[in-house]
Amino acid sequence: MWRRCLCLRDRWRRLLNQPSGGPTAIVRTGANIPSLSRAYAPPAGGFEINLDHRKLKTPQAKLFTVPSEALAIAVATEWDCQQDTIKFYTMHLTTLCNTSLDNPTQRNKDQLIRAAVKFLDTDTIWYGVEIGSSTSIMGPNIPDRTREVLVSHLASYSMWALQGIEFVVSQLKSMVLTLGLIDLRLTVEQAVLLSRLEEEYQIQKWGNVEWAHDYELQELRARTAAGALFVHLCSESTTIRHKLLQD
């Protein structure tokens, strides 16, 4: 799935090479009613999304503005995938953008970092840093130096990227798997599988409930992939120039 995400990024970059009118996407807001979705850069900076020639806004009525053109195209593509009924629960990138803009829980950067790092205490997978062993259900003690290194690393990300990282951590219940995924050392499928080791063991022992376990697996993969892609698109620094093809 991570390879598919990268292919989508390449596809969005190719779309950005269209004429200055910008890429468009058809979104259906009602039965058989086509609507125009367009991503473009406003004069003040950032990138907006237009639906039916109207500016997209957040649940708190703020102007929907994202930090990179690639992310704007991704959100426009997400809207393009909607059919007669808009299913917001499938629009993870849009949801993450809304959370970053509205910040409904009013958390600052330090609070986002602490929310992610707290999963170290219950992380069942560890790699590359110092950690003790434990036979207790409470888990081992995490060295202060280890926490400092991870906090310093997370502080290098922007607020938007941290929203995505905290989202992925909450899905996988693992800080280590999240960093492995963000650094492209793991695919989405691998990260999700490792996060579900205990559940997979129970499924092998007691059986699989297809309508429940299969749906849960696909949903977890979708949310994890969206969160990881969100982090990368928020950190996108590529400068894109629009060129008109000459006959």
Image (cartoon, rainbow, N blue to C red):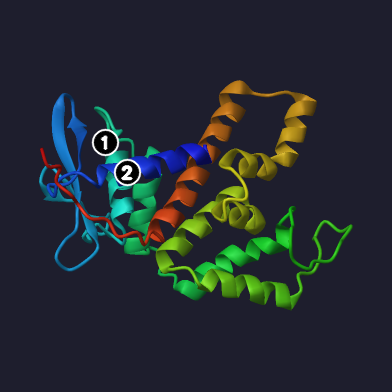
Residue type pointed to by label 1: Asp
Location of residue 59 (image quadrant): bottom left
Could you say which is closer to the camera, residue 233 or residue 66?
Answer: 233
The residue singled out by tag 1 in the image is 80
- Of tags 1 and 2, which is closer to the observer? 2
Badge 2: few (under 14), some or many (20 or more) residues near its Cα, within 10 Å? some
Q: Residue 178 location in percent, x, y? A: 59, 54
Relative to residue 29, is residue 164 depicted above or below? below
Quarter residue 138 falls in: bottom right
Q: Which amino acid type is shown beneath numbered disc 2? A: Trp
Per the image, label 2 sits on a secondary structure element best described as helix
Residue at (10% x, 46% y) in the render: 53
Mark identifier at residue 36: none
Distance CA(mark 1)–CA(mark 2): 13 Å
Q: Which comes sooner in the sequence, label 1 or label 2?
A: 2
- Quadrant placement of the C terminus: top left
Q: Label 2: which residue?
A: 12
Residue 105 visible in image:
no
**Which of these two is toward me, 90 or 226?**
226
Give the image location of residue 246, x and y in percent: 12, 42
Dividing the picture into quarters, in which one does residue 92 lie? top left
In depth, the one of 107 and 179 nearer the eye is 179
Identified at 64% across, 52% down, the residue is: 177
In the picture shown, does residue 175 fall above or below 201? below
Q: Residue at x 33, y 52 (%)?
A: 71
Residue 3, given in percent of the width and then of the height, sits at: 50, 39
How dense is the environment of label 1, judged by Cα within 10 Å: few (below 14), some, or many (20 and up)?
A: some
